[in-house]
Image (cartoon, helix red, strand yellow):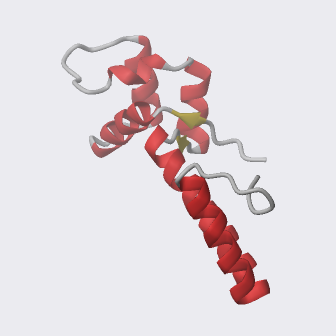
Amino acid sequence: MSNKPTIPAEVADAIEKARFSHWDNERIAYYVLNPDHTATGLAPLRSIPFDMLLAALVNGYEREMTEEERTHAAIKREWIDRDSRRQRNAYCDGFADGIEFVLGEISMLIEGVNA
């Protein structure tokens, strides 16, 4: 089990910006508790719970995926699964998967095939 929290991309960008400016964990935590209007682009640090921010600073973090990234990952997983099935059953599985995929894309149901 990972101790890395998943944080929004804006917060991850703000942490990276602070790190680029050579801020350590203490300075980032101080900024969150005592906001400085001259530090631009760091406001998202205050948008997540403080304990989650501390966990992200100490343990590292995972970026929350956007809807587009989630869709891309799902499509990639589907094609990896299809590729592994093709390797097991070679041509027949690939051909059948192709037919099912195309019928699904054009929203056509054929009894005994995909209905």
x and y percentages locating residue 39 in the rendered image: 23, 23
x and y percentages locating residue 37 in the rendered image: 22, 13
The residue under the point 56% across, 44% down is 62
Of residues 55 and 73, the one drawn nearer to the viewer in this rendering: 73
Tell me if 85 is positioned left or right of 6 in this view: right
Of residues 20 and 89, the one drawn nearer to the viewer in this rendering: 89
> Quadrant of the rendered structure where residue 21 is?
top left
- The image shows residue 2, relative to residue 75, as above or below, that is above
x and y percentages locating residue 106 in the rendered image: 52, 53
Tell me if 115 is positioned left or right of 15 in this view: right
- The image shows residue 76, relative to residue 36, as above or below, that is below
The residue under the point 79% across, 85% down is 88
Residue 80 makes an appearance in the image: no
Residue that extends furthest to the left in the rendered view of this protein: 38
x and y percentages locating residue 100 in the rendered image: 66, 63
The residue under the point 41% across, 28% down is 28
Of residues 59 and 99, the one drawn nearer to the viewer in this rendering: 99
**How many marks can you see?**
0
Tell me if 91 is positioned left or right of 103 in this view: right
- The image shows residue 114, relative to residue 42, as above or below, that is below
> Quadrant of the rendered structure where residue 30 is?
top left
